[in-house]
Image (tube, grey):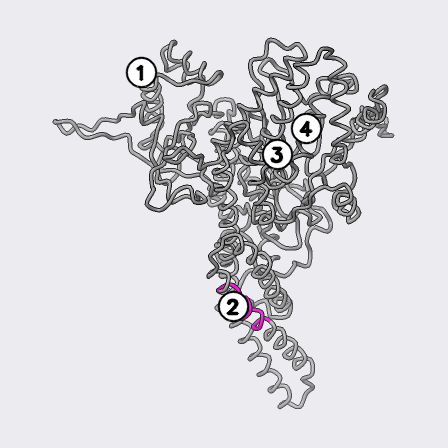
Amino acid sequence: MSEVLNVEELFGSKVFTLGKMKERLPRSVYKEVKKIMEQGGELSPAAADVVAKAMKDWAVENGATHYTHWFQPLTGITAEKHDAFVTHPDEEGKMLMEFSGKELIKGEPDASSFPSGGLRATFEARGYTVWDITSPAFLKEDAVGVILCIPTAFCSYTGEALDKKTPLLRSMEAISVQALRIVRLFGNKEATKVVASVGPEQEYFLVDREKYLQREDLIFTGRTLFGAPAPKGQELEDHYFGTIRERIGSYMKDLNIELWKLGVTAKTQHNEVAPAQHELAPIYETANIAVDHNQLVMETMKKVAGRHGLTCLLHEKPFAGVNGSGKHDNWSLGTDNGVNMLDPGDTPNENIQFLLVLACIMKAVDTHADLLRQSAADVGNDHRLGANEAPPAIISIFLGEQLEDVVKQLVETGEAAHLLEGGKLETGVSTLTDLEKDATDRNRTSPFAFTGNKFEFRMVGSADSIGSPNTTLNAIVAEAFCEAADILEKAEDFELAVHDLIKEYMTKHQRIVFNGDGYSDEWVAEAARRGLPNIKSMVEAAATLTTDKAVKLFEKFGIFTRVELESREEVTYETYSKSINIEAKTMIDMAKKQILPAVIKYTKSLADTVIAVKEAGADASVQADLLKEVSAKLAAAKEALVKLEKLEQEAAAMEDIKKQAFFYKDEVFAAMTELRAPVDELEMLVDKDVWPIPTYGDLIFEV
């Protein structure tokens, strides 16, 4: 009989929560901490020492020996440097465990060894981590021991942000200030801030670890660079929401336990569309905590998989021919007195505050569609976006029939006099309850879809940090709110002015609304007719960061400086080039050392068979034809391999990082595709016992 879990006791047991602070801190210090968390400000040195001691005592009681400033550099993953609590022994040789307020608040990692886009040279090493008081400290436990992790921001010695958290926190403050101006206009005097909340759904693949370790491409790049389709893929759609296998269920159970201990609200789990693909979804949280928790989700998924003899693949496209993985970023805005600014209510056509918010979001997304697209750009996502399994690379908004009709009425007449109703869904079965239908269907092909009281940004890649998408979302909507508030705060007749502004924004930006099939070729043509950008790759998206429009936006709200934006553009080019270079070199290595030698050995076996059959006086035409076909594809693979080697060397020698990135995209990646084609065809011809690496069938159906 399985052990009964007390989830309520388990949840947050490894987190230094507000509840634990309240128990362990003097009342005055607790109040000071809580006030700063809610309103901002700096903790006094004396209070910082008290908090540090309480945090250390709690951590040590739970087995911790070290602490780390846990931060999120521009690598897209987390970083940590462990320091022991131990101090110099006293004169009697007794070791003391100490942790000061200064150590809690500030750390000094090497800033020159992380991506900085030229902000830091190798000889300019100093950087700082600074405690994010709004995100609770937590304990990580593994073979290293128990480590107290303190979420921090990361910046250079000269003050530029070198991480994902700092700009996000800046953007959260910006949208709070501007959204508060909007709710004030509608009479909400009680709210003191507006909070961006996020719920990221995380897709992932699980494969057997022993088979994973036999695939050099999975080890080095996270995706299969070679691989013919299995006889069965996802055609029957039987994996989606299917019964969860026991091995996977055991993994999910342990994963939930670890996440609940860390205060992560893991809520939903199920099989996804592709074989061996799954999803985990949490409950909504404040944006920066959601970002921290999503990083923990990805780390924990990988760690727990190892305990079950599995490997968790977070790459956006680990297998060709079946759906890749994304991360749906559900985003909403709410005041601290309980008002969801994206809740349309029962009569959205009469909800003027909601309509203004909607109009501002339409304006923001249309004006900065390029930036929103860039925020979801990463190397792996290039395989998904626009590939009829994920949203297109074209940004549009799905509103659904009801809201689209409201917008149409407002644009045409300036008034939304009626509302489409959902009606009833009659099941036709006497024992089943008839259902109240939503007024709007869902659209899984839309990159930015309104889903009732939130927007779902569906473009984000599964391995990527959600820090950048939410920073961009907050920033562009803050700008739209600011411009609307500037107009409305000066209006003599507010009611007339707000109606005029809603109509103006919706009329000007209605082109961004599209409720149809985002996968269709017709939409690509229609989007071009509307003048919407179609940015197809990470490399093409990079330059959107440094347009005058982008610099003006981010500098206006103090989220990024021009220098910080230029650094991120450079990091994007470098990341792309390095990633494709690793993939190309891995393909070359696998082809030269594993695949081609195996095929050559197989052709010798075939040739020997042809000779033996002929000597026996039998017809050897089948064997001869197979030998001829395999040899031809072997020659094609060798020719493509030589071409790839030449282009990879040419690319690696280039010094202009932008030209290099485009060369990797246009030339090297194309050559990789040319090499893959004959190799995948050979896999279908060569004896399975001879093929040197596990196949798709081995990887995604034998878990």
Residue under label 2? 646
SS category of the residue bearing label 2: helix
Above-or-below relation of 224 to 326: below
Residue 361, disc: 4
Residue under label 3? 329
Give the left or right position of residue 634, taking residue 588 as reference: right
Q: Are marks 4 and 1 in contact (CB under 8 Å)?
A: no
Q: Which residues are magenta?
A: 637-649
SS category of the residue bearing label 4: helix
**Mark 4 and mark 3: span between their CA atoms?**
16 Å
Percent from the top left, x then y, of residue 220? 48, 54
**Mark 3 and mark 1: span between their CA atoms?**
40 Å
**Given the image, on which type of amino acid does mark 3 rest?**
Asp
Q: Quadrant of residue 110?
A: top left
**At x 44% / y 25%, what residue is drawn?**
136
Percent from the top left, x then y, of residue 506? 76, 28
Whether residue 2 is visible, yes or no, is: no
Q: Residues within 10 Å of mark 2 (few under 14, many from 20)?
A: few
Q: Residues within 10 Å of mark 3 (few under 14, many from 20)?
A: many
**Given the image, on which type of amino acid does mark 2 rest?**
Lys
Q: Residues within 10 Å of mark 4 (few under 14, many from 20)?
A: many
Choose the circle earlier in sequence order: 4 or 3. 3
Q: Is residue 647 magenta?
A: yes
